[in-house]
Amino acid sequence: MPKRKPSQRRKPETTPQPPRDRLAEIRAEIQDVQQQIETKRRDGRVIRTADELPKLFQAAHSEAAAAFGNGDLYMEKFIERPRHIEFQILADEHGKVITLGERECSIQRRHQKLLEESPSMRVTPKLRKQIAEKLENCLGEIGYQNAGTIEFLMDEDGSMHFIEMNTRIQVEHPVTEMVTGVDLVKAQIRIANGEKLSDIVPGPIDMRGHSIECRINAEHPEKFTPSAGKITAFNTPGGTGVRVDTAAYAEGVIPPYYDSLIAKLVTHGRDRDEAIARMSRALEMFIVEGIHTTIPLHRKIMENAEFRAAHFDTKFMERFLEQAKG
């Protein structure tokens, strides 16, 4: 019989070390910066002082190298209590770009949006105009075409920090449609057909009133576990200023394989208070039986004093759920 070759044992891999000169360079860069810095790859490490840099830099570098084979990192300003605000745009192939205001998306859990509204109570007319002009100039310069959403984090002092651009329609687009009167999906199709924005959206964009959207998910409202199964009853609310986007129905089955969103409940009012009042009423009228949904959760959010006063940030749900435990 042929002899068996002895098994070759793999040598343990060593984690690449960050270049010493780069670490010294970063230390010098932040030595005089009196702001918090976040070193990120997957999960961010918050560096609050220059002395914390070597240890946290090495930890993030090692984790990235082990997970991806690449230990490169980037650093950005860490915002303690940000608001998540995004701007809606439309752009045609003829070089025209328009903005349609902003959406407030700070009510989220684990970075997943639960509720959106338009306009944001923190965006002033002056800031809205400044951001709109910058977006229209930048996107016109690169020749962007289509609907799109540009997302920002707003600092506590009101400054805006770019996150990313989504080159598509967003789940929360109905709130923009409600306050502008522009059918974004229809506009997107007409843009793809080569039509001019001046024909699709004639005249200036006027934002009228306030709109709120609650994402109705097939999840337990307290445990947030998925709730698949057959819907035994499904009655949607109606009335002035109420819109429901859904494909769900009584006797329909919610499978466990896909996103848990089953409906978008949207209200519009002359102001934010009226939009909240209509949303509270609509949530009470919305009947879904056979599965759990997040309707009870949204009812409680509508009653929350912090939410009603628009004094919130992306950490709102953490505080809200902690208070519910007590």
Image (tube, rainbow, N blue to C red):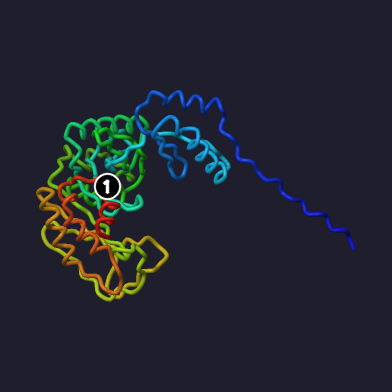
Residue 263 is situated, as x and y percent measured from the top left of the image, at 27, 62
Work out whether 204 lies above or below 245: above
Q: Residue at x 29, y 64 (%)?
A: 221
Q: Nearer the viewer, residue 240 or 318?
A: 318
Q: Is residue 307 left or right of residue 25?
A: left
Where's residue 71, x and y in %?
54, 38
Q: Would residue 76 be found to the left or right of residue 178 on screen?
A: right
Q: Residues within 10 Å of mark 1 (few under 14, many from 20)?
A: many
The image quadrant where one finds the N terminus is bottom right
| Whole-percent x, y for residue 12 in the image | 68, 45
Q: Which residue is mark 1?
A: 105
Q: Locate residue 79, reporting x and y percent.
A: 32, 37
Which quadrant of the structure image shows residue 162? top left
Up-down: is 287 above or below 178? below
- Kindly indicate the quadrant of the structure image that contains residue 228: bottom left
Q: In the rendered structure, which amino acid carries the disc numbered 1? A: Cys
Q: Is residue 97 left or right of residue 63?
A: left
Q: Nearer the viewer, residue 94 or 71?
A: 71
> Quarter holding the C terminus?
bottom left
Q: Secondary structure at mark 1?
A: strand
Q: Residue at x 52, y 37 (%)?
A: 58
Depth order, front residue of 115/149 = 115
Q: Residue furthest right?
A: 1
**Image point 27% across, 39% down: which residue?**
196
